[in-house]
Amino acid sequence: MKSVYSTAEKGPFALNEALVAREQDALLRRRTPTELVTGSRLWVGGRDYLNFSANDYLGLGSHEAIKTAFKAGVDEHGAGSGASPLVTGYSRAHQQLEEQIADWLGLEAVLLFNCGFSANQAVLKALLGKEHLLWQDRLNHASLQEMGSQLPCKMRRFAHNDMAALEGQLEPGRGLIVSEGVFSMDGDQGPWAALSQLAAQSHNWLMIDDAHGLGVLGPEGRGTLAAQGVSPNSVHIQMGTFGKALGVAGAFVGGTRALVDYLVNFARPYVYSTHMPAAQACAVSQSISLVRAADESRAHLQRLITRFRQGASQLGWTLGASETPIQPLLVGESRSALALSERLRAAGLWVGAIRPPTVPAGTARLRITLSAAHCEQDIDRLLEGLGMRAEGLHYA
């Protein structure tokens, strides 16, 4: 197929050339507009698909109680916030949500952000100067890696979940260790007891990005630390998001009162951004109430994860070492991953192909995500779709 991009463009930026190169390597990203997303399903182009690509792990994105809270919030507070939080954008609804999260997770204080990307970058930029060191797991989210590479501090990356490698890099009292609760592309968890021990021994601070663990893991959905029995007091900074298991949008950073007050004064993405709507805070608050009472939904989700992993293994597929709703089915080549995704889509199954640079070269995959909104029959239908392999394609 001939490319729609012309390489004959003139000017200082080779936009078309870069796009053509990605297209030729089967790495070009395109957006697909959806018409409706409810629980385990989505509609695209008038067709109904089983959705195995969303991060709506508890199926709360279309919950009536959350929608009602959102609508009531709009009626009471309006559709937007009107300003940054240090001007007039910080409402009583925002304050109540921050207090609710702090109580839920055992934190002194919490600060709300518009998204996890912004929250992660705000923390690193506000805290780290040229006199500091930053240690990051090699598979940390792009928001963390990108900001770390732009800061005046020295960043050191350690092999994924390799505590011996991290220990060999640490210097006493020099900076911040950052890792994830649940890794977004692999679905495995960071070893938080070991991480907290190394942080304490080396007198460095520790930060968790628990975007994909919050709501899913631990008693009352308190996340990875609670699931692993690690005290929140041993992790200096917690970041979580509301757009995954909580089914809404936004993020928070939590820790001590001093940390939050420092970020209010020095975190530029917080100071200079219009705040999330108060109505959104109302919806998140309702979602947290549902999440805390959703232990049966989490148990159902774990049963679905076990069912899928057993079935995929029997079919001969290679899966990542994940016991969470993120189930990476490793394919290898980008074209093969795209072809498998298209085959499943033709069968009414929506599963996205993840390719470099999001994941390392040679590890293209289907990132299958399961939800408590799925039933056993949905899992069986996915396994049926994975049961036939296309000839001529190369799978891991």
Image (cartoon, grey):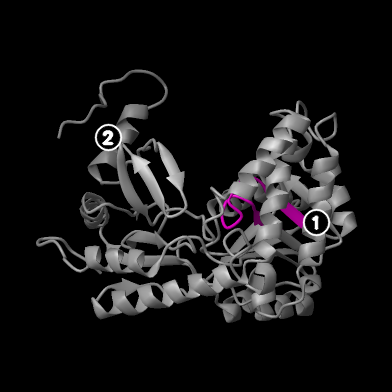
Quadrant in the rendering for residue 274: top right
Q: Which mark is residue 29?
A: none
Q: Is residue 249 visible?
A: no
Q: Is residue 328 left or right of residue 74?
A: left
Q: Can residue 281 be seen in this view?
A: yes
x%, y% of residue 222? 69, 68
Q: Name the residue: 88% across, 49% down.
A: 261
Residue furthest to the top in view is 10
Q: Position of residue 372 (x, y in %)?
A: 49, 64
Say few, some or many: other residues with alpha carbon within 10 Å of mark 2 (under 14 / 14 to 19 / 20 or more): some
Which residue is at 59% across, 81% downward?
164
Q: What label does residue 20 carry, if any?
A: 2
Tag 2: residue type? Answer: Val
Q: In this view, does 230 lie to the left or right of 30?
A: right
Mark in the foreground, 1 or 2: 1
Hey, what amino acid is under mark 1?
A: Gln
Instruction: Determine the secondary structure under disc 2.
Output: helix
Q: Please say if 338 is above or below 213.
A: above
Instruction: Answer whether residue 115 is magenta in the image.
Output: no
Query: What's the residue at 75%, 46% (across, down)?
Result: 112
Location of residue 273 by image quarter:
top right
Give the position of the N terminus as an image quadrant.
top left
Which mark is first along the chain, 2 or 1?
2
Compared to residue 104, the image places residue 78 above or below, namely above
Disc 1 on helix, strand or loop? helix
CA gap, disc 1 and disc 2: 49 Å
Give the number of the disc on residue 100.
1
Which stretch appears magenta? 239-254
Q: Which of 45 and 392 is in front in this view?
A: 45
